[in-house]
Image: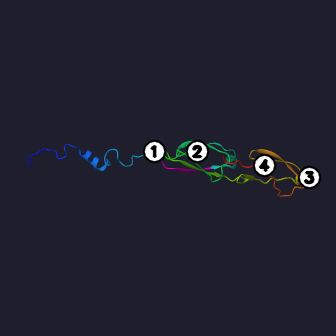
Amino acid sequence: FGGSTDDPFGGADFSEFFSSMFGGMGGRGGARGTRPCAGHDYQAELELTLEEAYHGGPRTLTVNGKNLRITIHPGVEDGQTIRLRDQGAPGLNGGPSGSLYLTFRILPDPRYTRSGADLTMDVPVSIYTALLGGEQVVETLSGPVKINIKPETQNGTRLRLRGKGFPVYR
């Protein structure tokens, strides 16, 4: 004991001592929760008419109070999901924003039935045109088309109009 005032640690700071022993895990710079973290993803559904799905075009959505303008490509399918990067929840501590997963729902159309890229519709034809033949105007999603009906066409006959079906997505 002899009244010595010598510092047994040689004047070194305790924090430096622990930092050298434990690799700087405590105190400054090593705190947990400060590393960047990506934001959560959002999911949403967008209802489209068959005509909107056929033509595509711009659309404005509101997701969590934010207006988002997107372009829908022609030919989207019912149930198809697209990913819009950086449109989800904001990241934490400078991390990237999450994504928005947008699922398309195509509403039923009273005129057309869709099967993949094929569109089917029933067209009433007068009995005179069915028996004697003639021209019939048919409305398609791309506009009216004039078709030729052969004489003695039977009820339920199917005619194919090439290139008038649904566009293939992208």
Residue, disc 2: 61
- Give the residue type that dot 3 points to: Leu
1 or 2: tag closer to the N-terminus? 2
Residue, disc 4: 162
Q: Residues within 10 Å of mark 1 (few under 14, many from 20)?
A: few
Position of residue 73 measured from the top left corner of the image (x, y, whole percent): 65, 45
2 or 3: tag closer to the N-terminus? 2
Position of residue 43 measured from the top left corner of the image (x, y, whole percent): 55, 51
- Give the residue type that dot 4 points to: Arg
- What colouring method underlies this structural image? rainbow
Q: Residues within 10 Å of mark 2 (few under 14, many from 20)?
A: few
4 or 3: tag closer to the N-terminus? 3
**In front of the other: 131 or 71:** 71
Give the left or right position of residue 31, taking residue 59 as reference. left
Q: Residue at x 76, y 44 (%)?
A: 143
**In front of the other: 8 or 36:** 8
Describe the element under mark 4 as helix, strand or loop.
loop
Q: CA distance from mark 4 to mark 1?
A: 50 Å
Residue, disc 1: 95
**Residue mark closest to the camera, 4 vs 2:** 4
Q: CA distance from mark 1 to mark 2?
A: 24 Å
Residue, disc 3: 132
- Bounds of the magenta segment: 39-46
**Residue mark closest to the camera, 1 vs 2:** 1
3 or 1: tag closer to the N-terminus? 1
